[in-house]
Image: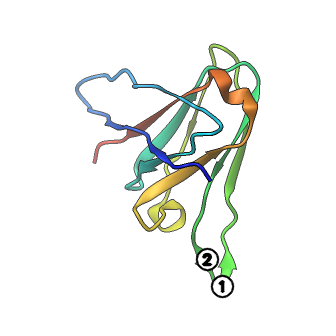
């Protein structure tokens, strides 16, 4: 498996609008981000449906929690927002959420991670 690349987490501020820093989504580059339970994932742009998987490391009564899979229709000017991600379900041991890009259609998709203020 490819090494995971950290996505920058931007913190919203009640008093100042932010313009999300966007990172290209690349199938070969699995991503991760630090998650505190108030973090959202934004997908922006694209040309067709794309599929992403949010990995879930935990178990309940010895049964694996199913990964969260999104099949997302994205046109050039569309966006989708996902989250927040409860830490006890989605965080890996390093306190990060792991994302796998499963579809070559993400070639024009950009991703941003935003944390809501407390």
Mark linked to residue 2: none
Q: Residue furthest front?
A: 2
Q: Residue furthest left?
A: 15
Q: Under tag 1, what secondary structure?
A: loop
Residue found at x 25% / y 23%: 16
Which one is in front, 73 or 46?
A: 46
Image coords of residue 52 (percent x, y): 67, 43
Q: Is residue 113 visible?
A: yes
Which one is in front, 94 or 2?
A: 2
Residue found at x 42% / y 46%: 39
Q: Residue furthest bottom?
A: 61
Name the residue carrying label 2. Answer: 59
Vertical order, 6 against 90 (above or below): above
| Pointer 2 local density, CA inside 10 Å: few below 14, some 14–19, many at least 20 | few
| Pointer 1 local density, CA inside 10 Å: few below 14, some 14–19, many at least 20 | few
Q: Under tag 2, what secondary structure?
A: strand
Circles 2 and 1, Cβ within 8 Å, touching? The answer is yes
Image coords of residue 28 (percent x, y): 63, 39
Instruction: Tell me the CA gap for discs 2 and 1.
Output: 5 Å
Name the residue carrying label 1. Answer: 62
Residue found at x 48% / y 59%: 86
Residue found at x 65% / y 85%: 62
Side (left or right) of 74 relative to 24: right
Image coords of residue 5 (percent x, y): 47, 43
- Number of numbered discs overlaid on the protein picture: 2
Vertical order, 30 against 1 (above or below): above
Q: Is residue 73 visible?
A: no
Vertical order, 110 against 103 (above or below): above
Vertical order, 81 against 108 (above or below): below
């Amino acid at each position: 498996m490819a090494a995971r690349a950290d996505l920058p987490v931007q913190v919203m501020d009640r008093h100042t609008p932010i313009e999300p820093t966007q990172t290209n989504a690349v199938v070969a580059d699995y991503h991760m981000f630090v998650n505190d339970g108030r973090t959202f994932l934004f997908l922006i742009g694209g040309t067709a449906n794309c599929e992403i998987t949010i990995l879930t490391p935990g178990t309940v009564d010895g049964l694996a929690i199913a990964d969260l899979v999104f099949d997302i229709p994205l046109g050039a000017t569309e966006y989708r927002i996902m989250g927040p991600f409860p830490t006890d379900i989605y965080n890996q041991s390093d306190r990060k959420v792991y994302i796998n890009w499963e579809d070559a259609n993400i070639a024009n998709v950009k991703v941003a991670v935003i944390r809501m203020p407390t």
